Structure formats: structure tokens, C-alpha cells
Amino acid sequence: MSKVLMITATGGTNYELAKKFATKAEDLGHDSDIVDLSEIDFPMFTVARSKELETVAGMSELKQKMGDADSWIVIAPEYNGSMPPTLNNTVAWLSTEWNDFRALFNRRKVGLATHSGGGGAHVIMAMRQMFSFLGCIVIGRNCIANKNKDANPETVEDMLRQLFD
């Protein structure tokens, strides 16, 4: 049995997509959890504040959940052709552990998904680039949904099976 963490950058439709992944993971006999980054409300990262990592409310709990999971599904809408600020800000805070910040990311299997008002391909590309750079093993298949196209249940299941193999 594996544990997968759904990390959603926003609530609403992306949170609903995270729940679809969580339900399917549990149907497949695995543990799942969801973290909504918009509910954590981290302060804006700046280099001057980068030494405050351990005093940022919610950071240690997030790091624990991320570290305890075998794999992640990162779900984010497209913002201006890239990632939403909540995701980028969170990763910036997580990467301030200069001693070994990659330990959280290195070799972690990651799946990418979006429910976007736009096409969604740009956020998938941006997340793929970022998580690959951080050392994650980003699976090739992704899930793109929008108001005209629901998440394909076969895609959701296949992505999870790839993470669990």
C-alpha cells in the first residue's frame, strides 16, 4: 500500500479534481490525503524572509505531509500561462532549506493535473519543468480538465497506477 498526497494550489474546481484522485486512490487500496495550499495562506516569499522557514505557520505540517507521502498529484489552474502564485510561493518557501532542500523532492514520483478556465497545457508544462528541476520523477501522463471537459476517469486511474508501480 502506498500513500499519495494531492496538493491543490486552489480550492473550487481544482479541489474537486483532487477529491476525484483521492477517491480513486482509496478505491485502488491506497492511502490518500489532500492539502489545499490556498487555505494555508503562506506569506509572500522574499530572500530577506527566507530564514523564517521554521516560523511560517503551517510550513512544518506541510513538509511532514509531503515527506510522509510516497508520491504526489499536484493540481493547479493555469494563471497567465503558468502556475498560480500559491504553488510557486509554496515551492519557494520549501526550497529555502539550503542544507538539503532537494531531499523532499528528489526521486519523488509526481503526477500533474489541472482544471483550468484556459487550455491548461501551459500550467502542466510549467509544473513539469519546476518539479523535474527539483529532482522529482514526473510521470508523462497528465490530466487536463475544464468547464467543457471533465477529468477522464481512465486518465485519473492510469496516473495513479503509474505512481504506485
Image: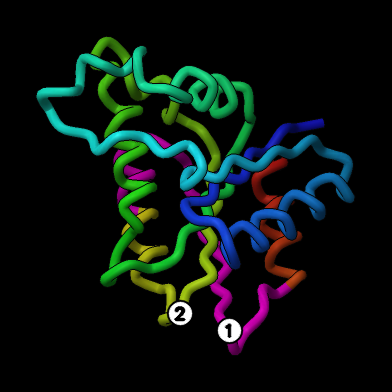
Q: Residue 83 at x, y = what percent?
A: 34, 58
Amino acid at dot 2: Gly
- Give residue 2's quadrant in the image: top right
Please give left or right for residue 24 compared with residue 27 in the image.
left
Left or right of residue 82, residue 110 in this image: right
Q: Is mark 2 on a helix, strand or loop?
A: loop
- Residue 117 bears which disc, if any? 2
What range is drawn magenta here? 129-152
> In the rendered view, does 11 fall on the left or right side of 130?
right
Residue 84 falls left or right of residue 156: left
Q: Position of residue 54 (x, y in %)?
A: 36, 13
| Residue at x 65% of width, y 55% of height | 18
Q: Is residue 64 magenta?
A: no
Q: Are marks 1 and 2 in contact (CB under 8 Å)?
A: yes
Residue 139 in sight in this render: no
Identify the mark at residue 79; answer none if there is no mark: none
Residue at 79 percent across and 48 percent down: it is 25
Label 1 crowding class (10 Å Cα cut-off): few <14, some 14-19, many 20+? few
Q: In the rendered image of this protein, does residue 49 appear above or below residue 120?
A: above
Q: Position of residue 58 (x, y in %)?
A: 47, 25
List x then y, in percent, for residue 79.
33, 67
Question: Which quadrant is home to the C terminus?
Answer: top right
Q: Between marks 1 and 2, how big is the CA–CA gap?
A: 7 Å
Tag 1 residue: 147
